[in-house]
Image (spheres, helix red, strand yellow):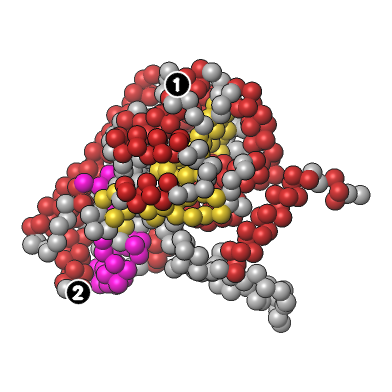
Amino acid sequence: MADSSAVPMEGSAAANRRVSVLARHLESSSSDVDSNEPSLYASLTSGSDGDSVFAHVVKAPEDPILGVTIAYNKDPSPVKLNLGVGAYRTEEGKPLVLNVVKRAELQLVNNRSRVKEYLPITGLAEFNKLSAKLIFGDDSPAIRENRVTTVQCLSGTGSLRVGAEFLARHYYQRTIYIPQPTWGNHPKVFTLAGLSVKTYCYYDPTTRGLNIQGLLDDLGSAPPGAIVLLHACAHNPTGVDPTLEQWETIRQLIRSKGLLPFFDSAYQGFASGGLDADAQSVRMFVTDGGECLVAQSYAKNMGLYGERVGALSIVCGTADVASRVESQLKLVIRPMYSNPPIHGASIVATILRDRNMFNEWTVDLKAMADRIISMRQKLFEALRGRGIPGDWSHIIKQIGMFTYTGLNSKQVAFMTKEFHIYMTSDGRISMAGLNSKTVPHLADAIHAAVKLNA
Ligand code: KET
């Protein structure tokens, strides 16, 4: 017989906390971070009705980002354009499997000794080691001193979730500050892991740049030890990153207040085209000897979206702490999905371990980043060419996959209805979904949408 008293105290305390966080979330379906979205569990009521015990289940809305693709797929128009999800497309508008990824897959398939046994709970050891080096640098003191524990997770989202679950169980401060605005899934990932989500100032709509003073004020008044979510580079959705000097000011504040940085690195290499340059923010927080968490994704930079390959690293004060933290990460992962999938991590390890393949990857990555930058220039010129009122220079100033256009939800709805252009309702467009042929269509749509609001 199962004995419920066998549940460890710590586990039941964590479960109770999670239930109370969820209850609070249910009560305030209009939380400050998510006011446009219905409660995550809108239909958690009891009772059955007629044909099904699930008859009370209400239809949930589509995801604000992934739902854009669903709407796009339903549109029969030949001129339709999907600028919603952040997924790279070629100049021909096609999804891209990198050549180096194809080569790595061929190698894997041709390797007769390869088996499909379960990976350890923490994933492929070589993948973890190489991933830590990629983000922290070959000569990272934290790696040398064995102060880093890295576990393979299900892409960036899974890495964030595992990190958040660990923090909810083992960290004394359960408030996490996320930038305003941020990737739409952040508040949900952290809330459902049992953390309490607050926001800090990030974007200034008047300058279309960073509100550094607001950011410093908000983090300055955060409670000691609070967790701070930082986008390592190519901030989503704004495309606005702090300069290195601003990063240094942020770092000093975070360290002086004893806040705990949690980096989301979903775009390493996509901001500048350089892997090391895009990891600089993270490395500043590691070379200072302090602790931090990093969630890495290979979805965008290796084009491995559907392979779900990523890693969570926790940089700890000592090697001993790191090894105990890893033992607890295993307890988080095992009941969630047992252990991660083998294929994507094997592709990444094959490429990262081989100097030629690694170099080929960096060339591909730079080409993808450059194509996005050239789309920024083309769109900017097309808007200027049409004499559209307003300063559109933010299109060429913003960094990474997205342009945060400043178009409002009414204008976005208009562009979808009249021009079959699909994007998130906050006016974010995925520059990676554009090509030379589709730029004029987008510029015409923006022109008409701006006139509509004039
Ligand atoms: N962090 C950020 C900042 C991010 O933009 C994404 C994905 C992720 C993490 C998760 O990526 P994963 O595929 O789990 O490695 N963003 C794009 C796709 C999505 O919403 O799922 C997007 O914003 O379009």
Q: Position of residue 142 (x, y in %)?
A: 50, 22
**Which residue is located at x 23 percent, y 38 percent?**
370
Helix, strand, or loop for circle 1? loop
Residue 192 on image: x %, y %:
59, 55
Question: Residue 445 falls in which quadrant of the image?
Answer: bottom left
Is 361 or 131 nearer to us in this picture? 131
Quarter-wise, where is residue 330 in the image? top right
Does residue 289 appear anywhere in the picture? yes
Residue 190 drawn at (x, y percent) = 54, 51
- Which residue range is magenta in the image? 397-426
Q: Is residue 93 in the magenta section?
A: no
At x 55%, y 24%, the residue is 147
- In the figure, is residue 405 to the left or right of 71? left
Percent x, y for residue 412? 29, 67
Relative height, residue 171 to residue 454 (above, below): above
Q: Which residue position holds label 1?
A: 140
Residue located farthest toward the bottom when viewing the structure as drawn: 50
From the viewer's perspective, is residue 287 above or below residue 295?
Answer: above
Instruction: Name the amino acid, label 2.
Output: Leu
Asked if the beta carbon under badge 1 is closer than 8 A to the nearest atom of ligand 1, the reply is: no
Q: Name the residue that disc number 2 marks.
A: 452
